[in-house]
Image (cartoon, grey):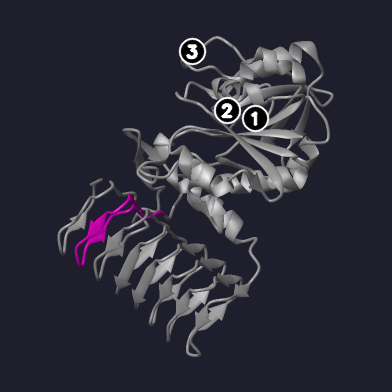
């Protein structure tokens, strides 16, 4: 099966983490987000991968190369991000026969993707409690009869999960008019297929669209939980490792460190002494987590330092961030309400009772900085020693 993976977007809702990294290449456990999609496709029987790339395309090309896990890889470039149908159209010259389309910034359980690959045309769906926030499928006897965007009166609780098996004829149906959103939508191609053929739906067991920082945390929680314990790095006799923890070769764990799984310490990272790494934490390559630091349910991207006496919980730290000694991240409101974050200028509920901060590339805090829940530090942002930061910087 030929599989087209959409990986061209910048991910503006994921800013500032996408300042230098395209959203599909953000880390989720031990590999980029889009690699989990590629792995699911290969496990389901893909015999060719075609990545549609755009923003920071070279990072995708350098990771996957011309062959990935024994499967040939090709690339198509989407010069402007004008919608999902526009993205697949960019790959049209590669399409030869029936083809699958997967979103490179979604996570799917592998068993469901395998079921999707069993025959087409097909579209993946997922049951949700609030279908009015999505594109909703109408289904009769297991076949899709229509799709409607964000209806006030949804015809079902099955929403479009953005994974499709298209017939070969759909190659000629990719030129669709702009939607009301000003984009060329793949759902219009799906509507054409529904008119011509029976389209079955496969209900996914698990699915996560990763569009905003807190969803990246959820993705990391999901994939870290599936890792098996492995200790390849150097662990001091006075350190303690509990549960499903992976410590990669080249990582160093100093005396007095306690790590509770699920957690991943990547190559050439150093932890401690006397640090406490709690479940759900990813520490990236070449990071330093220093004396008496506590991390909990946090993504720390490569080359970032949290040197001493700091607490960071439920947060995302981009590459090359440096937190001054004694930096404290608050991750809980006194009233217990959901924490909000500004996304594209709008204050948006994360749906999370516990949520810390997001720090972009190269952000730095002065010693004894206090950061309020939901604060975003832009790339290169700084704070003063002893400062209390309650708004985005």
Q: Earlier in the sequence, mark 1 or mark 2?
A: 2
Query: Given the current orientation, which residue lies at the most extreme front position?
Result: 66
Name the mark on residue 134.
2
Query: Mark 1: which secondary structure?
Result: strand
Q: Earlier in the sequence, mark 3 or mark 2?
A: 2
Query: Given the current orientation, which residue lies at the most extreme bottom position?
Result: 237
Disc 1 crowd rating (10 Å Cα; few below 14, some 14-19, many 20+) is: many
- Work out whether residue 93 or residue 120 is closer to the camera in this orientation and state it: 93
Distance from the alpha carbon under mark 1 to that under mark 3: 20 Å
Residue stretch in magenta: 355-373
Image position, residue 309 (x, y; %): 29, 74
Image position, residue 156 (x, y; %): 69, 26
Q: Earlier in the sequence, mark 1 or mark 3?
A: 1
Q: Which residue is identified by label 1?
A: 159
Query: Mark 2: which secondary structure?
Result: loop
2 lies left or right of 162: right
Name the mark on residue 180.
3
Contact between labelled residues 2 and 1, with CB atoms less than 8 Å apart: yes
- For the stretch drawn in magenta, the main secondary structure is loop
């Amino acid at each position: 099966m030929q599989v087209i993976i959409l990986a061209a977007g910048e991910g503006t809702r994921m800013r500032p983490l996408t300042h230098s990294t395209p959203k599909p290449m953000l880390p989720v456990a031990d590999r980029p987000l889009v690699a989990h999609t590629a792995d699911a496709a290969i496990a389901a029987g893909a015999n060719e991968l075609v990545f549609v790339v755009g923003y920071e395309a070279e990072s995708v090309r350098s990771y996957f190369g011309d062959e990935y896990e024994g499967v040939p890889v090709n690339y198509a470039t989407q010069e402007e991000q004008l919608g999902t149908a526009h993205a697949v159209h960019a790959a049209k010259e590669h399409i030869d026969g029936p083809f699958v389309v997967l979103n490179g910034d979604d996570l799917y359980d592998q068993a469901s993707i395998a079921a999707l690959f069993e025959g087409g045309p097909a579209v993946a769906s997922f049951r949700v409690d609030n279908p009015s926030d999505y594109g909703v499928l109408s289904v009769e006897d297991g076949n899709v009869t229509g799709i409607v965007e964000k209806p006030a009166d949804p015809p079902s609780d099955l929403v479009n999960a953005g994974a499709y098996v298209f017939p070969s004829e759909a190659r000629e149906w990719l030129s669709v008019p702009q939607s009301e959103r000003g984009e060329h939508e793949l759902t219009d191609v799906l509507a054409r297929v529904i008119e011509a053929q029976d389209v079955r739906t496969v209900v996914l067991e698990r699915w996560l669209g990763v569009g905003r920082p807190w969803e990246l945390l959820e993705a990391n929680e999901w994939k870290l939980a599936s890792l098996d314990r492995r200790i390849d790095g150097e662990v001091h006799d006075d350190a303690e490792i509990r549960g499903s923890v992976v410590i990669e070769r080249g990582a160093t764990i100093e005396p007095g460190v306690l790590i509770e799984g699920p957690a991943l310490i990547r190559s050439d990272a150093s932890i401690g002494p006397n640090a406490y790494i709690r479940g759900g934490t990813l520490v990236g390559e070449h990071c330093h987590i220093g004396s008496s630091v506590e991390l909990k349910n946090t993504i720390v991207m490569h080359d970032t330092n949290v040197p001493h006496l700091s607490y960071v919980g439920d947060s995302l730290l981009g590459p090359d961030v440096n937190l001054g000694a004694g930096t404290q991240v608050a991750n809980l409101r006194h009233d217990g309400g959901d924490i909000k974050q500004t996304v594209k200028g709008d204050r948006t509920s994360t749906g999370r009772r516990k949520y810390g901060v997001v720090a972009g590339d190269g952000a730095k805090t002065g010693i004894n900085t206090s950061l309020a829940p939901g604060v975003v530090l832009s790339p290169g942002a700084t704070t003063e020693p002893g400062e209390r930061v309650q708004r985005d910087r």
